[in-house]
Image (tube, helix red, strand yellow):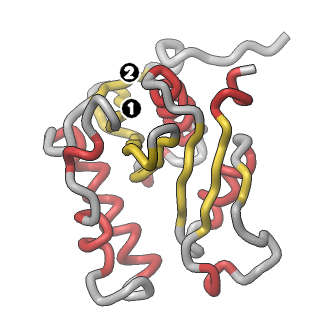
Amino acid sequence: MTTTPTLTSLGLSVLTLAMHDPRVKPLLDELAVEYTTRYGDFFGSGGAAEELRRYPAEEFAAPHGTLLILQENGETVAGGAFRRYDATTAELKRIWTHSAHRRRGLAKVVLAELEAEAARRGYLKIYLTTGPRQPEAKNLYLATGYTALFDLDADPEAIKHLAFTKDLAAAQD
């Protein structure tokens, strides 16, 4: 029988923080680099900076949202957030893994933590979008039970915003 490793056995701690907390800065800084490197002005002239300012920090605070990071030995290694999309749906944003810590399954841990917190807050569904130049994100969401709301055979660049959804009630069964 295979057992799922716990956060403690992985040496990880989960912190729920405000967007302006200094421990969130590595997440936001590297997301800005990632977005700029992958997209440039693909989504408009404001680029990465505009995307990271699109939603006020309060939208990621309780009671309707949350922002969490994973830390390993005091270092921020992964994180993500959700905000209220509608009365029954949380929207995931800012899913990130530090470039030096990728390919360890940390994004799956972040997703599981965000989904569990969204369910505790009474949300029934998750909605999210990712960009067309992030195939690893698209594959992660498909591998973790998300349903694509777009034609998987279409050119992702033509779609621009790849939307996904997941029913939290079904995921809990």
Residue 90 position within the rendered picture, expressed as x and y whole percent measured from the top left: 47, 42
CB under 8 Å between discs 1 and 2 = yes
Q: Is residue 161 above or below residue 89?
A: below
Image quadrant of residue 158?
bottom right
The residue tagged 1 is 70
Residue 128 vertical placement versus 10 (above, below): below
Using the rendered image of the protein, determine whether residue 39 is visible from the camera's viewpoint. yes
The residue that mark 2 highlights is 13
Q: Quadrant of the N terminus?
A: top right
Type of amino acid at the residue the image marks with label 2? Ser
Q: Quadrant of the C terminus?
A: top right
Q: Amino acid at mark 1?
A: Leu
Identify the residue at horizontal 42%, vertical 52% (top origin): 93
Query: In the orientation shown, which residue stands out farthest toward the right?
Result: 1
- Which residue: 48% across, 33% down? 114
For marks 1 and 2 on the same chain, the one whose residue lies earlier in the sequence: 2
Rounded to the nearest whole Å, what is the CA distance between mark 1 and mark 2? 6 Å
